Amino acid sequence: MITLRNAYRMFGLIFVVGLLAFLISPFATRPSSAQTGQLIGFAGISDGATVSGTLIIEAKTSGQVAKVVFRLSGPTSRSFTDNAAPYYFNGDSNGTPNGWDSTRFPNGRYTLRVTMTDSSGNRQSRQVSFVVDNSKPAPTQQTTVYSDSLDSAWANWSWDSTVDPSSTAQVQSGNAALAVTYNAPWAGLYLHHNGLDVSSATSLRFWIHGGGVPNRQISLALLDPSGNWTRVQQLSPPANSWTEVVVPFNGTFQPTRLVGIALQEFSGSPQPTFYLDAIQLTQPGGSPSQPQPTATSQPQPTATSQPQPTATS
């Protein structure tokens, strides 16, 4: 027999349980912040720019990203979906961007729209507009860093590495190549300059040969006179073949002076020999500008440890 008092108690219990369910349910169904992602912006392209040649365009993101979709509209359209970081327009090969060759597209005005979808299904979009103009390719001039030997304006300040600037084991062009062996974790090839004016430089170019080892992890960084390191690209050169690496300066390296080029071991273990050749900086044609040396402090490259580059013969 249910008394009036028991009925009140049952009603009160049901009311409390319902109230708790109402208060807790929004938190139970709210997506975790760990599942959200954010589309930060672009690297390698700016709104209103006029571009030509090959560009490295990257969508910068943070958080948990499921995919990034690039949609190019203009005289010719193109769509590309990248499902894994880093998110480059036209993809990458083991972290090395494939690049977008604008010479394969008609000149004209384009808009690139990027849509990021995070792990919870939320979407964010950004877009940038620019002009492709390959009608008048500007003459270019190369500043040599290495060609058969290290240019006299550059010095080998590598650390924990064996560097042979006259190797003939693998040669891409000329008579010799630069052979590099990492003897310790976080070792580095470091080529130092007293201060090179790169205010008009358009790219850093070189060829790399992976030796007989695939899936290497090498971080390419540039050093400015203030001691700041800009890590511009992760390299994983194919084994037993030469690959050209092109690093556009537009949107990648902002300082106007360069004092160092570093290729640092980034897997946390020693690595056998790989090879570099034809290292050069490209800038618009004309009379070569004379490097203006400036006093610089000893560079302090960092990754996990704090390697200290030292001058070597």
Image: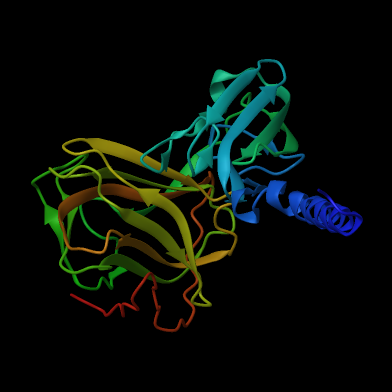
Q: Quadrant of residue 109?
A: top right
Is 279 left or right of 187, judged from the image as shown? right
Is 276 left or right of 89, judged from the image as shown? left
Q: Quadrant of residue 48?
A: top right
Q: Nearer the viewer, residue 65 or 71?
A: 65
Q: Residue at x 64, y 49 (%)?
A: 36
The percent position of residue 199, horizontal first and vertical second, equals 59, 59
Q: Quadrant of residue 98?
A: top left
Q: Residue at x 73, y 37 (%)?
A: 125
Q: Residue at x 69, y 31 (%)?
A: 112
Q: Residue at x 84, y 56 (%)?
A: 6
The percent position of residue 252, horizontal first and vertical second, equals 55, 53
Q: Nearer the viewer, residue 272 or 68?
A: 68
Number of on-image labels: 0
Q: Can residue 40 be seen here?
A: no
Is 90 left or right of 178, judged from the image as shown? right
Q: Is residue 23 above or below residue 171?
A: below
Is 31 left or right of 16, judged from the image as shown? left
Q: Is residue 77 above or below residue 134?
A: above
Q: Is residue 6 above or below residue 67?
A: below
Q: Nearer the viewer, residue 265 or 311?
A: 265
The percent position of residue 303, horizontal first and vertical second, equals 38, 69
Q: Is residue 306 above or below residue 154?
A: below
Q: Quadrant of the C terminus?
A: bottom left
The percent position of residue 154, horizontal first and vertical second, equals 33, 67
Q: Can residue 160 be seen here?
A: yes
Residue at the limit of the structure toward the front, as seen here: 1
